[in-house]
């Protein structure tokens, strides 16, 4: 349906600018900040001064102004305009943490603290309810944000990076944005809460919940007068702009820093548009520099009534940001808009008007023919001619009945028929032209859409080319890295094969060492058995020594008992004692001979053991030294290989044999320590053996010396013994019938 703009109801005027100062925050008070603003009156005024410079706006609100007062001044006129068919826009501008979101939304549901949007929604529905039954209303809302120069639908998170297009009237709109029909303020508040949960917010040094995007909430009201078939449409936009930031104050970094850069860039583009609109000499307005200015194209210098709410901080620490905000408002106040009522005329109404004019033309032609033929047309049959194409049939009949148009006056005007024909042709041309205009507009709109798509495609192509170049560079660098990695892998493979071969060799060596170690353990067991045998021999020696000592004591007792019975004088007594000593010596000699034989038999295994232990010690020492050296070399090579190629998981996995070798080395070292203990014990046994041998040699020498002395004594006394009687020798022989004495006699 075509849209008719009623120019008689147009409203041209400047953008309305409202300035609001918030109270000092606790952080600002803690930093020692003071209020730098100066108002001419307490409460409200149109001027504010900072230092020596003054700024004039439509209204300046003090920090004590209530939320209701802010709504009354800034938004209430826009609500009335929207219900009258105008488009309206209200956006909050200011630095971060200046109270923009609080002013726009506040605390929904709280009568005193709720902001502009919930108050406007309540007002719209109250006005709708106050209308009569002849009106129909359709209310739709949408909610989206501009984040990082991409439009995100807050009511459908799957819709991201939406595009901006132009309607037939060259009005920008967001394509495929979600619109929801609402029937009560509660429905709207639920939608606002849903969208607010999907907004991008972050914590900075200046604000715990800093908005990182520009949010746009729109409410469109379509109304239809059923009585007059009049349709009006008005849309009210609420924009909560993200605050301008200084990185030094907010402490932004990482993603938050990139968001701050994008926010400042879009706000700078908005400032450039305001500057261009306020300067009458500039013909180009850079609306396309950002998505924000593209959406605000109708609100800034177009078909809308716009109000800017400046949110400022009075703190001395934010003086530069406050001045920048006030300068923006001063320039925006010079921008002019031309708003028109958006009224729609139905096709049925156009058809009724056309058929009415066509019927009038036909009746007037018939009446003219009758007059020319000389017929008399009664006044009741005359058709009244109306100058206005909107005159109704009843108006036409009334004009003839009142003789406002007489036949003579009608015929006197020779151009009436021509005028009727021209009117008919004009009406037909108007109808055709309107239809052609619609087609032309559709084509222009399609052309604009295609141009927009072409620009977007070109931007996409440029982005893809840049991305492709970047990917090519990354691909080249990746290829070089792959080549280097391939060479490194080849080196690793070669080293791995070499190390594997070395490891196999070392495993064979370790197996040989294990075999030798087993042999050494077997030898150790044999040594232990021999040591047990040696202990048994020692026990036998001790028993033999005990028996030897007992025999000596028996001999001494026997000699002591025999000495008093000898009565052959001093020589014979000495001879008998010497003979006893000789017999005793011979007995001892026999016993020591037996002991010597036993000792030789007992010490011979010890000598063999000592030689075996020495050879085993030398062999184990040599094997241990070689094994330790090989294991250390293998461990150092494996550890170096692992250290230089720690990125290769397979090499890490194959180093485990080397670690097993290290564990085996520890076990070998433990076995060597045990072998050292055994060798030390064997050395101690060797020392005991040497002591026994020395004791044996000493005893043997003593016995030999005693035997030689006794033999010499016996030799010197043989001559004296021949004269003695045989009875003197029988008695001693009869007394010495023990096995030991018999052995001594046998020995003699």
Image: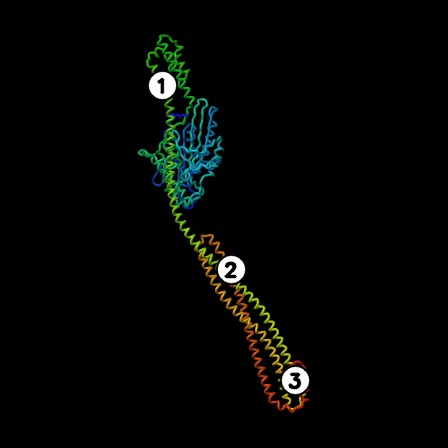
Furthest-left residue in view? Answer: 281
Q: Residue at image x 38%, y 18%? A: 389
Task: Give the side of residue 581 with respect to residue 102, left or right.
Answer: right
Secondary structure category for the residue under label 3: helix
Give the quarter of the image for residue 683. bottom right
Q: Nearer the viewer, residue 727 or 303?
A: 727
Among numbered discs 2 and 1, the one appearing first in the sequence: 1
Query: How would you rate the neighbour count of disc 1 (Cα within 10 Å): few for under 14, some for 14-19, many for 20 or more?
Result: few
Residue underneath mark 1 = 425
Q: Is residue 305 visible?
A: no
Can you say which quadrant of the picture contains the N terminus? top left
Query: How would you rate the neighbour count of disc 2 (Cα within 10 Å): few for under 14, some for 14-19, many for 20 or more?
Result: few
Residue underneath mark 2 = 663
Q: Residue at image x 54%, y 67%? A: 677
Q: Is residue 31 visible?
A: yes
Give the quarter of the image for residue 18. top left
Task: Give the side of residue 64 with respect to residue 676, left or right.
Answer: left
Q: Give x and y (percent) for residue 414.
A: 32, 13
Mark whose residue sits in front, 3 or 2 = 2
Q: Nearer the viewer, residue 57 or 543?
A: 543
Q: Are marks 3 and 2 in contact (CB under 8 Å)?
A: no
């Amino acid at each position: 349906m075509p849209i008719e703009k009623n120019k008689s109801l147009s409203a041209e005027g400047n953008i309305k600018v409202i300035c609001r100062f918030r109270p000092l925050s606790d952080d600002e008070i803690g930093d020692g900040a003071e209020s730098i603003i100066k108002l001419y009156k307490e409460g409200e005024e149109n001027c504010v001064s900072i230092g020596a410079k003054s700024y004039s706006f439509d209204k300046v609100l003090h920090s004590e102004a209530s939320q209701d007062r802010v709504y009354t001044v800034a938004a209430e006129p826009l609500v009335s305009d929207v219900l009258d068919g105008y488009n309206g826009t209200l956006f909050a501008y200011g630095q971060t943490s200046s109270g923009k979101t609080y002013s726009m939304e506040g605390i929904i549901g709280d009568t005193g603290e709720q902001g502009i949007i919930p108050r406007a929604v309540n007002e719209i529905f109250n006005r709708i309810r106050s209308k009569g039954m002849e009106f129909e209303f359709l209310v739709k809302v949408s909610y989206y944000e501009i984040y990082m120069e991409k439009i995100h639908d807050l009511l459908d998170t799957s819709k991201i990076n939406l595009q901006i297009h132009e309607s037939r009237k060259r009005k920008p709109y967001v394509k495929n944005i979600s619109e929801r029909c609402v029937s009560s303020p509660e429905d709207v508040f639920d939608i606002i809460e849903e969208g607010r949960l999907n907004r991008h917010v972050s914590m900075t040094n200046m604000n715990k919940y800093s908005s990182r995007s520009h949010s746009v909430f729109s409410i469109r009201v379509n109304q239809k007068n059923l009585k007059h078939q009049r349709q009006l449409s008005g849309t009210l936009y609420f924009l909560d702009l993200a605050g301008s930031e200084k990185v030094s104050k907010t402490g932004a970094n990482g993603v938050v820093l990139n968001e701050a850069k994008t926010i400042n860039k879009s706000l700078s583009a908005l400032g450039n548009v305001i500057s261009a609109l306020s300067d009458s000499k500039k013909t180009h307005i850079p609306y396309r520099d950002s998505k924000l200015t593209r959406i605000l194209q109708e609100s800034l210098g177009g078909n809308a009534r716009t109000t800017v709410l400046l949110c400022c901080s009075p703190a001395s620490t934010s003086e530069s940001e406050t001045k920048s905000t006030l300068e923006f408002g001063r320039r925006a106040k010079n921008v002019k808009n031309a708003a028109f009522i958006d009224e729609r005329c139905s096709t049925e109404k156009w058809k009724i008007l056309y058929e009415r004019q066509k019927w009038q033309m036909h009746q007037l032609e018939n009446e003219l023919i009758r007059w020319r033929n000389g017929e008399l047309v009664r006044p009741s049959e005359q058709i009244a001619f109306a100058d206005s194409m909107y005159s109704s049939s009843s108006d036409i009949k009334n004009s003839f009945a009142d003789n406002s148009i007489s036949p003579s006056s009608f015929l006197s005007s020779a151009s009436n028929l021509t005028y009727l024909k021209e009117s008919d042709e004009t009406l037909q041309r108007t109808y055709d032209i309107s239809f052609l205009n619609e087609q032309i507009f559709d084509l222009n709109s399609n052309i604009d859409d295609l141009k927009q798509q072409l620009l977007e495609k070109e931007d996409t192509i440029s982005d893809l080319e840049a991305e492709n170049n970047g990917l090519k560079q990354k691909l080249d660098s990746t290829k070089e890295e792959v080549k280097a990695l391939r060479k490194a892998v080849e080196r690793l493979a070669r080293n791995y094969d070499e190390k594997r071969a070395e490891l196999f060799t070392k495993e064979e060596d370790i197996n040989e060492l294990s075999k030798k170690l087993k042999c050494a353990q077997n030898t150790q067991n044999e040594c232990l058995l021999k040591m047990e045998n040696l202990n048994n021999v020692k026990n036998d020696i001790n028993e033999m020594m005990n028996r030897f000592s007992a025999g000596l004591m028996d001999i001494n007792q026997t000699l002591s008992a025999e000495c008093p019975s000898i009565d052959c004088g001093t020589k014979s007594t000495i001879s008998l004692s010497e003979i006893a000593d000789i017999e005793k010596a011979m007995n001892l000699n026999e016993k020591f001979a037996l002991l010597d034989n036993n000792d030789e038999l007992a010490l011979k295994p010890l000598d063999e053991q000592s030689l075996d232990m020495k050879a085993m010690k030398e062999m184990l020492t040599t094997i241990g030294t070689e094994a330790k050296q090989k294991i250390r070399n293998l461990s150092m090579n494996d550890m170096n290989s692992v250290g230089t190629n720690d990125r290769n998981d397979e090499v890490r996995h194959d180093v485990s044999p080397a670690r097993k070798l290290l564990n085996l080395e520890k076990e070998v070292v433990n076995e060597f320590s045990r072998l050292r203990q055994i060798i030390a014990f064997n050395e101690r046994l060797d020392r005991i053996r040497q002591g026994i041998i020395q004791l044996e040699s000493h005893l043997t020498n003593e016995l030999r010396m005693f035997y030689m002395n006794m033999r010499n004594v016996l030799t010197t006394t043989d001559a004296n013994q021949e004269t003695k009687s045989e009875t003197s020798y029988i008695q001693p022989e009869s007394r010495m019938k023990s096995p030991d004495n018999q052995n001594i006699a046998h020995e003699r």
